[in-house]
Amino acid sequence: MWAVRGTRGNPARTLHELVDSPRSDPMPECQLPPEGGVGGSDPMSGPGNPLFPETDQEVMDAVRTAFFLDPILPENAFEVLSIDRVVYLRGVVPTLDMKRRAESVAGQVMGVNRVVNELKVAVP
């Protein structure tokens, strides 16, 4: 049986005892993402009300951030414009799936009322 050398004040214990014993310093809980998603509360300031984009510039920034956080969409592949919280997507994408995904991601951002998807699919 394996034994772990004791330290000051702690006797030697077997590996089995160490594995099965409860931790005296439990790991802290993981922090969940903000309820509001992109454009939600600042994770550094703790829980609170999600931040709602107040201007069209903030809406565009939030949509660009959502594209940046998406593992499939390229961050700056298309133009993002917001007028009265209506987001317009313009540019060329390689696939129809990417066009649909961009519209879906933009539509989930807080502050976006509607998405007008003007993206064109590149012809091979």
Image (cartoon, helix red, strand yellow):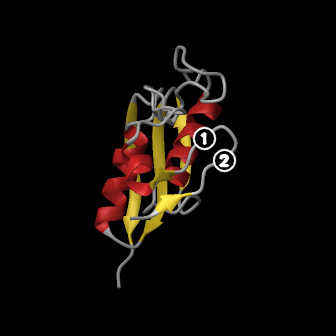
Regarding residue 117, the answer to whether it shows in the image is no
Q: Residues within 10 Å of mark 2 (few under 14, many from 20)?
A: few
Residue bearing mark 1: 10
Picture coordinates of residue 111, whole percent (x, y): 48, 26
Asked which secondary structure carries label 1, the reply is loop
Regarding residue 37, the answer to whether it shows in the image is yes
Query: Residue at (66%, 47%) from the top-left corner?
Result: 7
Picture coordinates of residue 38, whole percent (x, y): 50, 36
**Type of amino acid at the residue the image marks with label 1:** Asn
Asked which secondary structure carries label 2, the reply is loop
Q: Which image quarter holds the N terminus? A: bottom left
Query: Residue at (43%, 26%) from the top-left corner?
Result: 35
For marks 2 and 1, give the CA distance.
5 Å
Q: Nearer the viewer, residue 11 or 51?
A: 11
Tag 2 and tag 1, C-beta contact below 8 Å: yes
**Quadrant of the rendered structure where residue 79 is?**
bottom right
Query: Residue at (31%, 55%) from the top-left corner?
Result: 100
Residue bearing mark 2: 7
**Type of amino acid at the residue the image marks with label 2:** Thr
